[in-house]
Amino acid sequence: MTPNRILPDLQSSLLVEDVRQEASGNLILVGVLGVIRVPQVPIAAPKVCVVNRWCSGIGQFTEQVRIVAPDGQQVLRKSNAKFALPDPTQTATLVSVFPGIEFPVAGVYHVEILVDDVMKVRFPVPVIVVQQPPAAQ
C-alpha cells in the first residue's frame, strides 16, 4: 500500500533581507540575518523574508510563518501558504515577504515555522541596539 500523505521535513529555513530570482528560476538570497543590529528602537525594516524548503513529504499542506516579539506572545507578522508535494523526491521552496515590519523593542524575537499546525522549527533572531560612532566633523 502506498501512503497518500506524509508530513514533509523542513530542509532549511532562513531569515533574509531580500530574495531575487535569476532567469533560470534559481533564487538569490540577499543578506542572511542571524542578528539584526539597529541604531535605535522602535525601528521598521524595509523588508525581511523567510525562505523555507520542504522535502520528503506527500500531499497538500499549509505552511505558517510567524515572527514573534520578545514577550513570546505577540505575533508581529504571520503568513500562510499552501503547497503540494506529489512524491517524496520533490521539494517546495516558499518565500514569505514581510514589508515594513516594525521591531518595537530590543530583544530576542523568534521565527516560527509550522506545517499543518505542527511546529517544525523555532529559531531566535536577536535585535540589538548598536551605538553609532560620533560623526566626523
Image (cartoon, rainbow, N blue to C red):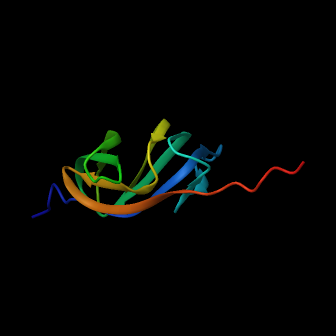
Q: Nearer the viewer, residue 77 or 135?
A: 135
Place of residue 96 in the rendered image (x, y in percent of width and height, measured from the top left) = 43, 43
Residue extending farthest to the top is 100
The image shows residue 47, relative to residue 123, as above or below, that is above
Assign the N terminus to one quadrant of the image.
Answer: bottom left
Using the rendered image of the protein, determine whether residue 88 is visible from the camera's viewpoint: no
Residue extending farthest to the right is 137
The image shows residue 54, relative to residue 102, as above or below, that is below
Total number of numbered labels? 0
Q: Residue at x 47, y 38 (%)?
A: 101
Q: Is residue 64 left or right of residue 126?
A: left
Q: Residue at x 29, y 47 (%)?
A: 63
Place of residue 123 in the rendered image (x, y in percent of width and height, measured from the top left) = 37, 63
Q: Is residue 117 left or right of residue 13?
A: left
Q: Residue at x 90, y 48 (%)?
A: 137
Q: Is residue 73 left or right of residue 13?
A: left
